[in-house]
Amino acid sequence: MTERGLCASGAQPFCVHSFAIERENAYYRDMFTEKINNFNLKEICISGQCFRMHEDDGAFTVIAGDRYLKVSQDGENVTFFCDREEFEGFWKEYFDLDTDYEAILAAVDPEDSYLMRAADTACGVRILRQGLWEMIVTFLISQQNNIPRITKCVENICRAYGRKCRAADGTEYYAFPEPEALASLEEDALMACNLGYRSKYVVRCARKIAGGSFDMEALKTMDYEEAKAYLLTLFGVGEKVANCICLFALHHVDAFPIDTHIRQVLDAHYADGFPFDRYRGFAGIIQQYIFYFELHGDREIV
């Protein structure tokens, strides 16, 4: 649950999450540990699908919309610094914990040596179920961009236009701004947040959504092909961006975004065509294994 109010100055709204904390040492009272296989926080953090998850002093912090979570891991033991109600109501779905990733990994063709290595390297990655509006903005920003710059751009937008929030441990952070917060801006206003030419993409999309001519609730009910076609009506959204939104916001796990990294893999290892039929129903998860492997395959995850 989120309680909203005004900060002491009365100048800026903030949201306070109702976690219980110890008054003196700021540790959470509401915390618990789950044993989860095929789940690796660091792999998820650097997988290129989320840009408000950060490693901090051996743990990770995640901001999703206006929610904040601290989470840590020791092997398969994952500690969530929140109560059970919030975990069951939000974070369990967010981390896609009801999906059987063991079965997906077992379905990888053992004769495909490249994909076997990719899946083995990225076996802790999950497809997060992230907010639709946030993913529209994030992947508009992602075009011709890199992960550190995308992360910075997203943080700049949140600091400039999002609500100021306070977590249970006193950490201040910024919620992702609603479409209405960006719809009134000049088209070049987000250049100040380092978006460059992408500023007009985000502002025009915000106007269309805030004005009601693009229905995000209807989008959530569409199948993959319908959703992708509808997303392509947004200014600045092309095939790759539409597929990223379908995969990371709408959880259409047949979406298979193709960027430069994936195109190179397809050309090098699947000249006769990628076996989409074999991976029907979870091709997007396989894509993430490939993408992660291309980014981090030579790096040791500790």
Image (cartoon, rainbow, N blue to C red):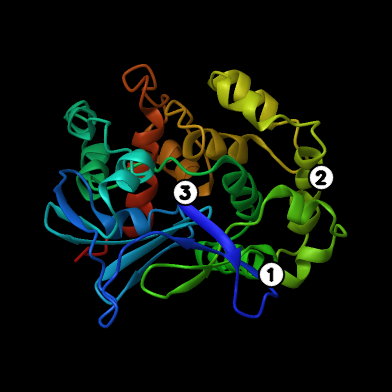
On the image, numbered disc 3 is attached to which residue? 261
Residue 119 x, y percent position in the rendering: 24, 41
Tell which tag, 2 or 3, sits nearer the viewer. 2
Q: Amino acid at mark 1?
A: Ala
Q: Amino acid at mark 2?
A: Arg
Helix, strand or loop at label 3? It is: helix
Q: 90 left or right of 65?
A: left
Q: Secondary structure at mark 2?
A: helix
From the image, which quarter does the C terminus lie in? bottom left
Any part of residue 119 in sight: yes
Cα distance between the residues tagged 2 and 3: 32 Å
Mark 1, secondary structure of its residue: helix
Q: Are marks 1 and 3 in contact (CB under 8 Å)?
A: no
Q: Which residue is mark 2?
A: 207
What's the mark number on residue 149?
none
Q: Is residue 23 above or below residue 207?
A: below
* Front position in the image: 77 or 110: 77
- The residue indicated by pointer 1 is 160
The residue shown at (86%, 57%) is 187
At x 27%, y 68%, the residue is 59
CA gap between label 1 and label 3 equals 32 Å
Q: Tell me residue 38's x, y (percent).
A: 19, 43
Q: Position of residue 53 (x, y in %)?
A: 41, 61
Label 3 sits on what residue type? His
Mark 1–mark 2 distance (CA, rounded to whole Å): 18 Å
Residue 228 appears in view: no
